[in-house]
Image (cartoon, coloured by chain):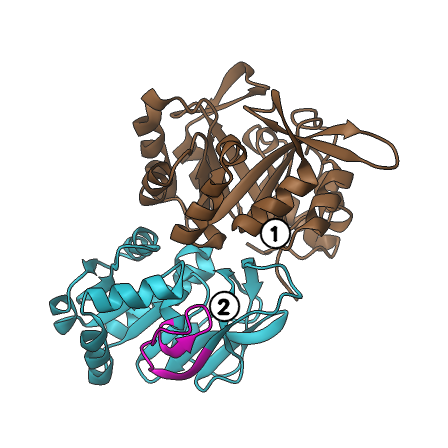
Chain colours: A brown, B cyan
């Protein structure tokens, strides 16, 4: 089996511009989404995710225009999400050029949304994003699902929710560690490995990446199928191509040369 | 050059359109059988469910016009579900009839690997094909599917391995098909599309 592990830069946007900041506090401008998309497409990214982290109704047309501009730059798959609550929302995202739809809070609140999206677009187009936070440490690790940007508990067990999402038709899980997000201390290996083994679909690991070794570790020990990062790519701390060169040298299957 | 891009209301039509534009190739979206009559090449993009695709082809009366064009020798490229639609049937929708250009039934990949088969994988090229000119077993292509045609399929020119070997590229005379998405496969996908357009020109 030679399926390559994917490296996925993520563009968090306020609808129009790429922004960065931890837990929505002190957001800073990190550039134009289309310019960054073109850069990552040329740098060997395997896929791109663009999220509307503000997701307010009023600027929806702005975000759709952002998706159109980003899609125009890409010869790789594009996932998009943020504030998708209905089939109608999803259709507009797909029509704007996204190959996959990412849902999070709305799917927790109304799980049938996953089935509706899967029936219309196919499981391969439905990414369920799960924000997980460690609840019980020690021998029996437990993670709690967080919603609304990681702030509120959904009172759901992350493993159980991941399994349920797949049963309902999710084709992929985008797993973010709320504990690690923004810390640059490495991916949550225990969390990623637990979820990856619990479900029959690919898992994208997110939250905490900084060094080349962090990525190697999440693939070799965390059983992740893909790894996502944002700031370290935007800031040039890592280049996608440099990262893939490193992983290839570690005998981790990646699309390289790219 | 009149490249018809069959637009049956779903799927990856805009992505294919953009990929062709990057190669300076102009395509036209076609939703009616008349659009296929004068086509010098036809592309059938597809993503999603087998049932949705064959129903849409029938609702738009495209089935017979497409088969006639193939019989005339018009170069054809089926992508992903556009490959699967060429078969007699699919286990994804057993009651429905495919285009029947290739015999056999499209089946689910085995559950021993994570499904869908999603991501970048390589080919095992079995036979030379103009579609694969300049490409080799080191090149990666982007796949996103759960169902696939068997590796033993007649006219399979390249296989891919994911749980089991399956047909990744087919060619029979003027009829080409890929299980992966060349429009999403970076430089190697662009090369494949360029190879196809060269057959048209």
Residue B148: x and y in percent read: 49, 71
* Structural distance between the alpha carbons of marks 1 and 2: 16 Å
Residue B60: x and y in percent read: 19, 64
Residue A105: x and y in percent read: 52, 30
In the figure, residue A8 lies in which quadrant? Answer: top right
The chain holding disc 1 is A
Front residue of A167 and A195: A167
Is B6 placed above or below A192 here? below
Front residue of A144 and A180: A144
Q: Which residue in the protein does label 2 denote?
A: B147
* Residue at x 66%, y 51% (from the top left corner): A199
Where's the N terminus of chain A, which quadrant?
bottom right
> Per the image, is B89 magenta?
yes
Same-chain check, marks 1 and 2 = no
Judged by its main secondary structure, the magenta piece is: loop
Question: Which residues are drawn in magenta?
Answer: B85-105
């Amino acid at each position: 089996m030679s399926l390559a592990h994917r490296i996925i830069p993520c563009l968090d946007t306020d609808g129009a511009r790429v922004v960065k900041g931890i837990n929505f506090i002190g957001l800073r401008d990190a550039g134009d989404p289309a310019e960054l998309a073109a850069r990552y497409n040329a740098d060997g990214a395997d896929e791109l995710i663009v999220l509307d982290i503000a997701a307010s109704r009023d600027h929806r047309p702005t975000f759709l225009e952002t998706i159109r501009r980003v899609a125009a730059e890409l010869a790789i798959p594009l996932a998009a999400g943020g504030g998708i609550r209905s089939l109608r929302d999803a259709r507009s995202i797909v029509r704007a050029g996204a190959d996959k739809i990412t849902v999070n809070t709305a799917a927790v609140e109304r799980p049938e949304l996953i089935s509706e999206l899967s029936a219309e677009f196919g499981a391969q187009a439905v990414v369920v994003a799960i924000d997980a936070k460690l609840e019980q440490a020690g021998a029996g690790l437990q993670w709690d699902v967080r919603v609304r940007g990681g702030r509120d508990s959904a009172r759901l067990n992350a493993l159980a929710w991941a399994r349920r999402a797949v049963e309902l038709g999710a084709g992929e899980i985008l797993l973010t560690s709320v504990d690690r997000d923004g810390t640059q201390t490495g991916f949550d290996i225990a969390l990623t490995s637990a979820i990856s083994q619990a479900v029959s679909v690919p898992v994208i690991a997110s939250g905490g990446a900084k060094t080349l070794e962090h990525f190697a570790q999440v693939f070799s020990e965390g059983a992740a199928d893909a790894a996502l990062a944002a700031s370290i790519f935007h800031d040039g701390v890592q280049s996608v191509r440099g990262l893939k060169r490193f992983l290839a040298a570690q005998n981790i299957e990646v699309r390289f040369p790219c | 050059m009149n490249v018809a891009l069959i637009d049956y209301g779903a799927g990856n039509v805009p992505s294919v359109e953009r990929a062709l534009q990057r190669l300076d190739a102009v395509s036209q979206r076609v939703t009616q059988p008349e659009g296929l009559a004068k086509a010098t090449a036809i592309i059938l993009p597809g993503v999603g469910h087998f049932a949705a695709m064959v129903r849409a082809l029938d609702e738009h009366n495209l089935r017979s016009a497409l088969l006639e064009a193939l019989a005339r020798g018009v170069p054809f490229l089926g992508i992903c579900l556009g490959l699967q639609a060429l078969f007699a049937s699919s286990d994804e929708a057993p009651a429905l009839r495919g285009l029947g250009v290739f015999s056999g039934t499209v089946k689910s990949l085995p559950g021993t690997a994570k499904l869908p088969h999603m991501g970048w994988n390589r080919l095992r090229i079995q036979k030379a094909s103009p579609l694969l000119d300049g490409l080799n077993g080191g090149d990666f292509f982007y796949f996103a599917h759960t169902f696939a045609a068997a590796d033993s399929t007649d006219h399979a020119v390249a296989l891919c391995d994911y749980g089991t070997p399956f047909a990744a590229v087919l060619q029979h005379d003027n009829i080409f098909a890929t299980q992966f998405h060349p429009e999403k496969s970076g430089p190697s996908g662009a090369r494949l599309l360029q190879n196809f357009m060269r057959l048209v020109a």
